[in-house]
Amino acid sequence: MIVALVGNQNCGKTTLYNRLTGAGQRVGNWPGVTVVKHTAGLLSVWQRSCTEPVRVVDLPGTYSLSAFSGDEDVTRRFLLETPPDAIVNVVDAAHLERNLYLTLQLLSLGIPVIVALNMLDGLQAGGGWVDAALLSQRLRTPVIPICARNGQGIGGVVGSLENTAPPEGKIRYSGAAGKALDEVMRLVPERRLAPFLFDDPNLALQTVPQAQQSRIFAVLQRLEKETAQSPGDALAAERYRVVQALLADCWKPACLSTRAVRIDRLLVCSRLSVPILLGVAAAIFWLAFGTPGTFLTDVLSSLVARLTGRIRLGLQAAEAAPWLVGLLTEGILPGIGSVLGFLPALLVLLLLMDLLEDSGYLARAAFLMDRPLRRMGLSGRSLFSLVLGFGCTVPAALTARGIRSARERRLTLLLAPLMSCSAKLPVYALVARAFFPRCAAAVVAALYMTGFGLAALLGRLAARMGDGRDETAFLLELPPLHVPSAGNALRQTLQHCREFLGRVLSLVILSSVAVWLLSSLSPRFTPAHTLEESLLGRLAGLLSPLLAPCGFGSMEAAAALVTGIAAKESIVSTLAVLAGSNGVAGVFTSPLAAFSFLLFVLLYPPCIAALQAIRKELNEPFPAFLSGWGRLFAAWGISMLFFQTGSLLGLG
């Protein structure tokens, strides 16, 4: 049995999906978190209530089955091309006037529908109420109150799956639109497709016999003349009238508190809005990279160093083979330890971002940034993808599917890698602490701001070069502000931690072993006495002259950049293996050269997984070139210009 979770954006579908299946899909207090469908089986605790296996599909949020963006089209195509056995329509109880519009469309598909009335706590907190029994009677389908966040009512939804049946009767539409819909339904072989012909009349050419096509077009043209609206707008207006009738005497909306209104005005509409946003960003950077984050990093780095020393002594006492001692204590452990040492700062940053997102402030930041982003050829919707880019470029590329404008979506994909992902953070922190110990947090913040500034500059140039005809209005539903859930934020952060450790235990170990072997063996596969004699030294020696104008022509820096193509965490592990006891301070000749290296890391192509995600979403040769080789040339040029200019000014 296939059950699809369908609903508006930010109504709690993914939270319910995680409750039903035990999955750990990302949830957030902003619209458009889910952009692809996810499938999993019911947890055993729920499966006991069903006589047959149940698979649950979490679909991207949509306000209508008339898809306007890529993620909404995923939902529409799934429901029409591979209809599920049942639909659980998750609706926000506080916004039923808007949510039930989609419900009416789902009921017309002829698929059993269960309406899950979510977020009742928010409705009741604002003095609102809903009569679920009366609403169920009017919709002729089960309406079950639930709270996806704490699990209340979910058993009722699962229990209703066994008794699902197509909706009894159908919702009656009146007026010219209702009359036209009845006529079209009699002319269409598949009645469930009739409403879609109002939004896309050309669909009739694909699904309706030629003998009926002219009659359908005549009905739609008559409706347009009678209502002075397009057929789709006329039917939409009738649906909203029906929703108002359904909710009469069975639903009272919540009232916004004056306190919430005042807070929103302060955060979005006052002169203090931008200073508050900048202050929040500064506080996040200070907590992650300032005194608190540095203290945690020092503690973990000290523990890793002690563990490495004890393992070395233990192996020597056991008279282990010298190559094994070298592999473990000079290759694997330094590589892993160098990355793990910066895990606390990364977790602090991600935890703070998750708390900020769960509170609802991220959506307000997107609204606040819409005007500046417009100058870049983007909109506030792009901010969600750009913010996700600070965590990982792959989900940033996926969420760009929710951007309706093709031009804006393309530009967002090309600019997202300029947002420093979490894999670059250990590189920034390692070099900044070695060369700028008193202002490491400011240096890391400057790199983040440099990436955003370059994105703004490139976006501005692209906006001037474009004709602007593909611009779309930015419409955003502001989620309610509330105290963030520490448990939810912690779960999200631990998920990030597991993903980070997974990379460390796979790519970093492999790269550390490879770097150690290549730096220990000569081209004749005999022990190399110096780095210059080794295989890695020969390869890095070919690249070093090209990087010398940028200020970091050492073989260690060249080798680190090569391994960083696979994963940016490998840069730190490679430097740890090659630098040895001298540390990263011996790799660069000056702070100017060190910062030039960080600029190169910021700008050169993202990891292979991110490149593949971007190219898949772009599906265009030239933009794909810009995300790969073009970024490599830009990184070399900007780093070289920065270092040479600094040297002329005597900053080196």
Image (cartoon, rainbow, N blue to C red):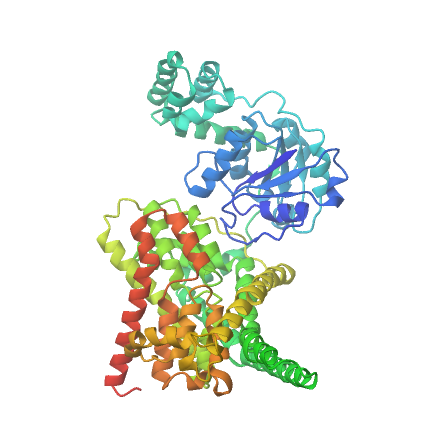
Image position, residue 112 (x, y; %): 62, 28
Placement of the N terminus among the 4 image quadrants: top right
Residue 110: quadrant of the picture? top right
Q: Residue at x 39, y 61 (%)?
A: 417
Instruction: Tell which residue pokes out farthest to the right in this image.
Output: 48
Q: Residue at x 53, y 67 (%)?
A: 510
Of residues 377 and 325, the one nearer the viewer is 325
Placement of the C terminus among the 4 image quadrants: bottom left
Of residues 366 and 491, the one nearer the viewer is 491
Vertical relation: 343 (above or below) 123: below
Would you say residue 147 is visible in this rendering? no
Vertical relation: 3 (above or below) 460: above
Q: Residue at x 29, y 65 (%)?
A: 633
Looking at the rendered structure, the number of numbered marks drawn on it comes to 0
Image position, residue 274 (x, y; %): 40, 66
Of residues 518 and 205, the one nearer the viewer is 518
Would you say residue 391 is visible in this rendering? yes
Q: Is residue 169 left or right of residue 462?
A: right
Of residues 397 and 251, the one nearer the viewer is 397
Image position, residue 166 (x, y; %): 62, 24
Image position, residue 218 (x, y; %): 35, 16
